[in-house]
């Protein structure tokens, strides 16, 4: 495909989904590493493998099943991405933004984006959840933005505002649900790096010094595209490993997937509660 997405390409993908689904999804949900089991509870679900959709980036990473699950959850019509693609897999940034563009053309109003993230804040423990209140877009600062190239005026302006990337009202709903269900919900700043290597202790100390609480390799490109099109965003990180600020521990992807088993029930509680309140 071309380096930059065109409206025609986006609409071809939309048409491929509409050919298989009659419902009008209102909420998009992106599930990160090891968090896919949440999609199993979608009712009256239509399953669409990513590879069946033109231009859609196919995930190559264990823990990302690589399909859309479209149906009903807590009375809301949802489109769930069971897995995602990443910059480190070799995709161009605009292609990583394609799924959110498709959601916007389908009429989705809310995006719930999740990820498995490494702790930068030493107070965070594996299995904890963090409400994302803001992010550091280190990949984007270095020039790799999903909005690079011709602006798609149908979605939003050339220079979108990012002062409220994560919707305060949706964040308040998540806090309420967490409090009512005794789920510990930290809040903080998520930083996106390119990966795929995990961070060195010096990386983590630097990220801590500039204000990051959790680190991952996703989410920020999707949120950037969402906000360009004025889609409201709720972001939640599942903490998969302890901050390795001193270099005494080794981080593995298997550890990330294992932490997902602890994270998923808590994440499901919050997402279900938020959906009920929308």
Image: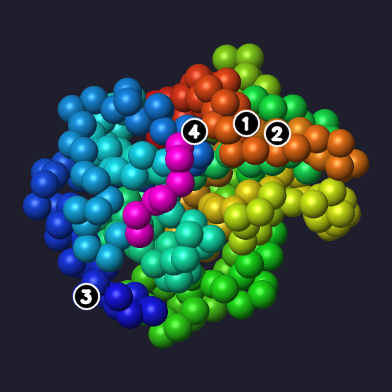
Name the residue that disc number 3 marks.
8
- Counting residues from the start of the chain, the first of labels 1 and 3 encountered is 3
Q: Are circles 2 and 1 on residues that touch, CB within 8 Å?
A: yes
Q: Nearer the viewer, residue 156 or 251?
A: 251
Rounded to the nearest angstrom, the CA distance separating label 1 from label 3 is 41 Å
For residue 35, side relative to residue 203 (left or right): left
For residue 133, side relative to residue 272 (left or right): right
Q: How is the image coloured?
A: rainbow
- Counting residues from the start of the chain, the first of labels 4 and 3 encountered is 3
From the viewer's perspective, is the residue at label 1 or at label 3 nearer? 1
- Counting residues from the start of the chain, the first of labels 4 and 2 encountered is 4
Q: Which mark is residue 34?
A: 4
Q: Secondary structure at mark 4?
A: loop
Name the residue that disc number 2 marks.
241
Label 2 neighbour load within 10 Å: few <14, some 14-19, many 20+? many
Q: Nearer the viewer, residue 103 or 38?
A: 38
Q: Quadrant of the N terminus?
A: bottom left
State whether residue 194 is above or below residue 189: below
Total marks placed: 4
């Amino acid at each position: 495909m071309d380096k930059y997405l065109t409206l025609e390409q986006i609409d071809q993908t939309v048409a491929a989904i509409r050919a298989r689904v009659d419902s009008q999804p209102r909420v998009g949900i992106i599930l990160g590493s090891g968090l896919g089991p949440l999609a199993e509870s979608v009712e009256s679900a239509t399953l669409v493998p990513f590879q069946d959709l033109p231009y859609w980036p196919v995930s190559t990473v264990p823990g990302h099943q690589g399909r859309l699950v479209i149906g009903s959850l807590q009375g809301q019509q949802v489109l769930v991405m069971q897995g995602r693609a990443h910059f480190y897999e070799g995709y161009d940034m605009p292609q990583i933004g394609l799924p959110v563009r498709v959601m916007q053309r389908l009429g989705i109003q809310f995006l719930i984006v999740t990820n498995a993230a490494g702790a930068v804040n030493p107070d965070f423990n594996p299995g904890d959840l963090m409400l994302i209140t803001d992010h550091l877009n280190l990949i984007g600062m270095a020039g790799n933005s999903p909005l690079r190239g011709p602006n798609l005026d149908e979605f939003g302006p050339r220079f979108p505002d990012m002062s409220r990337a994560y919707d305060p009202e949706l964040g308040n709903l998540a806090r309420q649900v967490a409090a009512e269900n005794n789920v510990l919900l930290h809040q903080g700043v998520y930083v996106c790096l390119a990966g795929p290597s995990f961070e060195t202790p010096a990386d983590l100390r630097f990220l801590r010094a500039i204000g990051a609480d959790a680190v991952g390799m996703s989410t920020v490109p999707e949120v950037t595209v969402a906000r360009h099109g004025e889609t409201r965003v709720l972001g939640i990180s599942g903490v998969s490993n302890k901050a390795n600020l001193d270099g005494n521990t080794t981080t593995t992807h298997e550890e990330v997937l294992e932490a997902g088993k602890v994270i998923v029930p808590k994440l499901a509680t919050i997402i279900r509660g938020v959906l009920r309140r929308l």
